[in-house]
Amino acid sequence: MNGVLTQHLHELAHSLGASLDVPVEVTDVQLHRIARSTPNSSADEGFAETVSPRHLGLSARSVALISEPVYVGGSADLGMPLMLVIPVRSPGSAPSLLLWITCVRGPLSPERIESVGRIAEATVRSLETAGLLASPEWADDHVGRAFASGDLDGLDSLLGQAIRDGKLVHDGTFVCLALSMPPALAPDASGSAAQRRLTAVMNRFAEDHLRDRCLIAFSGSVGFALLAPHPRDIQPTLPGRLAAKTADLIFRSRRNGVDLPWLVTVSTIVADRASVAVWQARQSLDLAESMGWKHQVVHWERTAHMRGLAAVPTDVLVSHFISPSLRRLLEDESAEDLVRTLRTFLTTAGNVKQVAADLYLHRATVYHRIRKVEARLGADLFSGAGRLEVHAGLLAAEIVASRTDGVIFPGAVRLIGTAPFH
């Protein structure tokens, strides 16, 4: 959630905690802590601190069934205090909140419970009225299909209408993020479970942004978030931070420690034309899926050298881009250090100092390895033409290895996870 909203909820928890003289915590229905009161002094120091709902053995699924105030816990022998859970629902479509009150002096009276509930609901209503607590703007299905198609003209029309309708407020800059989370391939996998997980992650992502600056759209197993960041938030690191936040949300959404296949792609910061940001995120996703990547974050600006080769058929890549000498080098298991040094050397445009820093090597070691690679490939890697030819061959080998799950050029598979655009 955004900082202003969190501050208001902290104030709610603190005021309730001070009034009741007990610890109070606010969570969402997924049991993510949002705010808590400042721990009070208590005669019972063992229960003076709030206890995480998860420590009570509760799950988000069980908590979702709570519709009225209910007591949970209450076992001193097990170190589980009695806690009162009060569901707080906004009158609109915003996510539900939960109040967790640690009852260090026993159950509260019905009148006290009703009073606390009214205060919490009034706070939530005021936050929603101020636009701080509101669900993200969800685009219609046909908008989701347009996002997935990447049709610039169609997107221009649809997004222009959304802007005119006030669904998307902007200052002329946009960033788009796409998340693909297809159903697992396991026999007991549930497509609906994967869809619920996708929806939950996108919803959590949107909660960190103002409602009128975030447009959410879905198409099948892909979710899109189009952001119109405030000018003060526009920094070169913004796309990377958004992608990292999404990857963290995916990690936190895992069930029983099992991770399903996912891909996150993010556009650059695009000026004036929102459709271009969507198109970049969509194209990055197409590239990643064609390469067979999984569990990766892919940045549009870091894939320029891959986009053209990714469209070339596999047999053409093998016959026209990958020389026999390069193939022998990649298939030589003892040459893994040479291949890693070569790749870093090529991606840094032959900057030996940078290669040494990236691989924690002495520059003399880098020069020695590059000379050995030159001898094996018969190429001059300190010339632009030589580096270009070898780099194209190495990228082609990565693409072929991805498409064939390592059956061809297994040595190149080890490069995929260390690619600089992931």
Image (tube, helix red, strand yellow):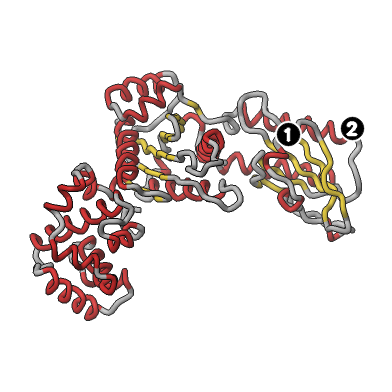
Residue pictured at 80% horizontal, 54% vertical: 40
- Residue that carries the numbered disc 2 in the rendered image: 111
Is 147 displayed left or right of 109 in the figure? left
Is 129 displayed left or right of 100 in the figure? left
Position of 384 relative to 134 (above/below) = below
Query: In the image, residue 80 lies at what x, y percent?
Result: 82, 54
Query: In the image, residue 174 lies at what x, y percent?
Result: 36, 36
Q: CA distance from mark 2 to mark 1?
A: 23 Å
Amino acid type of the residue tagged 2 in the rendering: Glu
Query: In the image, residue 3 lies at what x, y percent?
Result: 57, 43
- Residue that carries the numbered disc 1 in the rendered image: 65
Position of 402 relative to 358 (above/below) = above
Query: In the image, residue 27 lies at what x, y percent?
Result: 68, 43
Is 263 displayed left or right of 256 in the figure? left
The quadrant in which residue 215 appears is top left
Residue pictured at 66% horizontal, 29% vertical: 126
Residue pictured at 30% horizontal, 77% vertical: 361
Position of 309 relative to 86 (above/below) = below
At numbered mark 1, what does the secondary structure look like: helix, strand or loop? loop
**In front: label 2 or label 1:** 1
Amino acid type of the residue tagged 1 in the rendering: Leu
The answer to whether the residues at label 2 and label 1 have Cβ atoms under 8 Å apart is no
Q: Earlier in the sequence, mark 2 or mark 1?
A: 1
Comparing 32 with 11, the one in front is: 32
At numbered mark 2, what does the secondary structure look like: helix, strand or loop? helix
Comparing 378 with 283, the one in front is: 378
Label 1, residues with CA under 10 Å away: few <14, some 14-19, many ≥20 = few
Is 67 displayed left or right of 388 in the figure? right
Label 2, residues with CA under 10 Å away: few <14, some 14-19, many ≥20 = few
Comparing 359 with 183, the one in front is: 183
| Residue 22 seen by the camera | yes
